[in-house]
Each structure stands twice: as structure tokens, then as C-alpha cells.
Amino acid sequence: MLVAAAMCPSPPLLVPSVAAGAAPELDAARAACADALGVLAAAGPERLIVVGPAERERRGEHPSGAVGSFRGFGVDLDVVLGAGTATKRAGTGESPGRELPASLAVAAWLLERAHWAAAPVSGLGVGESLDTEPCLRTGRELAARAGRVALLVMGDASACRSLKAPGYLDERAAGFDEEVARALRTADVAALTALDAELAYALKAAGRAPWQVLAGAAEGAGLGGELLYEDAPYGVGYLVAAWS
């Protein structure tokens, strides 16, 4: 059963060494992410599952100890998913699993930064084009994996909030982001379920599929929500929220 969830942005710019000179611009977002992780720890989960967008896979499991890297962003930095709780392959000294997609690597960095040790961690990458119903089914399955499950859900809102945004300016973007922010603030499972997958894809909203996985996991859980951060730096909607 889902007992808590934290929603955080997924851009590698959250990692200061990747953002370099621009790192202070996202200090407030990092602080909000730390607060959201605190909500997860306080819920006393038996298991934490990180869910984030992954371009090349419809659904991919990543076990505790899987390694991610920011070398593709020009930074010599590796992270380990669930570093505080991960186990190594017996006798090899190697961490299990494929390399983490970027969104899960950012999550691993956030967890390392928070010294997460409250529960074992695993990860799930979901394709940005995955339809709503498979997302909901996936969420229900995740919630059933333990008596007390917490989710760390990575993803961004639209990338079309300004002329210099990755997707250029789209007049639909602000309204889409406002609805997502409202749904996360009020823990509105129905509103997340109703997000338009085609519109989200057009607006380059990478969080749509992970948020709909959250919606499936949260069905019947009766959680309350709090929005901890909302902004659109670089024309991309960044949201941080916590449900418990």
C-alpha cells in the first residue's frame, strides 16, 4: 500500500556540478526536494521505489545498487541507487543492473545527498510515450509490493514556457502546468489520471507518465498533498510536492 510519495524535478541541472555557475539558481528547488524526502522517511516505508521518465524503454526495472553517471553532461560523477542500503554482487564487488536513465540518476543523487537509509530502494524507468492505462496498472502493482510503499516520482512539467525553452513558447503550457500543480497540491488522483498524454508529449512534459504511475499507486490510499516548490526556470516547469 502506498503510504507516501515525493515528486521532484528530473533535470541533471539539479546536480550542482552539472549546473556549474548556475547552481545557486536551483538552491530553493534542492531544498524543497530535501523536505519532500523527509516526508517519505517520516512515513516509515518498508520499501522506496523511484519512478522516472526513460526515453528508450517502455518499462525498465533498476535494482538497488544500480549505477548512474553524469559523464554525458560533462561531469565525472557516478551515483549509486540506494547507496545507503544497496548491496553488491557477491564476490564481484560490482553493482547490479543496467546504467540508470538520467532521471533516476538525479534521484540517486538526491537520495545520497539526503543520506537516505530509511528503506531499501529500487527504480523503475517508464517511457514518456507509455499510455495512461499501462501507467495506472504499473502504479497499482508497485503499491502492492509491500505493506508500506513510498514512491519518489521524478519528472518535469512542460518545457514550453518561454521563447528560450527547449520546446519554444506554447500558449497551452502555462495552463497545463497549473493543472498539474493543482493536482499535486491537492493529491488529486483523478486529475493526474485525466492528463492528456498527447498534449503532454507535445509540450515535452516528461513527468506525465510517472505522475500517472503515481495516480495508479495512490488509488484508495487517501493521502493528502502539499506543493513545496513551483517555478519555471529556463522555461521548464519544475514542481516539488509531497503526499502523506
Image: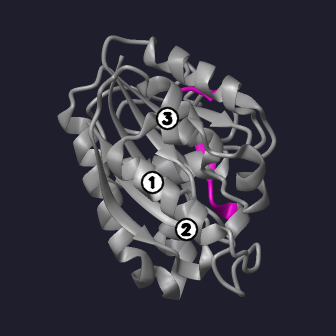
Q: Indicate the quadrant where residue 210 lies.
A: top right
Q: Where residue 50 is drawn, which disc sits there?
A: none
Query: Can residue 171 be seen in the rendering of this structure?
Result: yes
Local SS, label 3? helix
First in sequence: mark 1 vs mark 3: 1
According to the picture, the residue beneath numbered tag 1 turns out to be: 8
Magenta region: which residues? 61-71
Q: Where residue 190 is drawn, which disc sits there?
A: 3
Who is closer to the viewer here, 196 or 48? Answer: 196
Residue 31 is covered by the magenta coloring: no
Residue 69 is covered by the magenta coloring: yes
Local SS, label 2? loop
Circle 3 residues within 10 Å: few <14, some 14–19, many ≥20: few
> Left of 166 or right of it: where is 27?
left
First in sequence: mark 1 vs mark 2: 1
Q: Residue shown at 69%/46% (left/top)?
A: 196
Q: Quadrant of the N terminus?
A: top left
Q: Amino acid at mark 3?
A: Ala
Q: Where residue 237 is drawn, which disc sits there?
A: 2
